[in-house]
Amino acid sequence: QLQLVESGGGLVQAGGSLRLSCAASGRTFSNYTVGWFRQAPGKEREFVGAFNWSGYTFYADSMRGRFTVSRDSAKNTVYLQMNRLEPADTAVYYCAATRNFYSDRAPWYGYWGPGTQVTVSS
């Protein structure tokens, strides 16, 4: 059974950078698309970006250019590099996995980590 755990969240000042990690256990990511989502209090869960099993990345329009998804196959870990962070980026960030080749919708992801808090101060 695929299990996911996020790490790397914390407090960062606006304009700074942070890298989140999503470590998999039980199975590898080789046959999954791994996506990143975020959810702030009172808001819908929002797609950030994803890395599919063929090595393609895709992003929400609002995230493109600041956020980058990558993978380290040897460590079975997917990363979310976040640059030029803004207070509006404050949210719980989740990684999730799906067998779909392409998906930017949360209901299509069947495996989720518990999330990691990212707080961006002004």
Image (cartoon, helix red, strand yellow):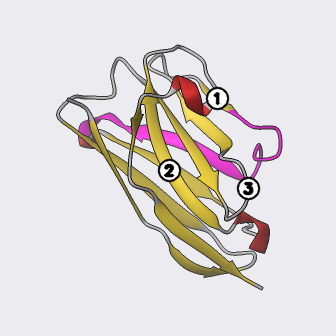
Furthest residue in direction right, as rendered: 62
Q: Is 89 rendered above or below residue 51?
A: below
Q: Looking at the image, which residue is at 74% across and 66% down?
A: 84
Which element type, helix, strand or loop, lies under badge 1? loop
Are circles 3 and 2 on residues that touch, CB within 8 Å?
no
Tell me which residue sits at (63%, 55%) in the image. 39
Q: Report how far apart the C-alphas of labels 1 and 2 lie in the structure.
A: 13 Å
Q: Which residue is mark 2?
A: 94
Vertical arrangement, residue 110 with respect to residue 71, above or below: above
- Looking at the picture, how far across and down is residue 89, in whole percent? 71, 64
Q: What x and y, as percent, mark residue 37?
A: 59, 45
Q: What range is drawn magenta here?
A: 59-74
Residue placed under numbered mark 1 in the picture = 105
Image quadrant where residue 87 sits: bottom right
Front-most of residues 79 and 43: 43
Alpha-carbon span between mark 3 and mark 2: 14 Å
Report the disc number at residue 67: none
> Which amino acid type is marked by label 2?
Tyr
Give whichever of discs 3 and 1 has the lower sequence position: 3
Crowding at dot 3, Cα within 10 Å, few <14 / some 14-19 / many 20+, comes out as few
Per the image, the residue denoted by label 3 is 43
Dot 2: within a 10 Å radius of its alpha carbon, few (fewer than 14), some, or many (20 or more) residues? many
- Identify which amino acid the numbered label 3 is placed on: Lys
Q: Secondary structure at mark 2?
A: strand
Is 96 above or below relative to 92? above
Q: CA distance from mark 3 to mark 1?
A: 15 Å
Three-letter code, disc 1: Arg
Residue, x 25% and y 38% (percent of image)?
74
Q: Is residue 45 above or below residue 26?
A: below
| Placement of the N terminus among the 4 image quadrants | top left
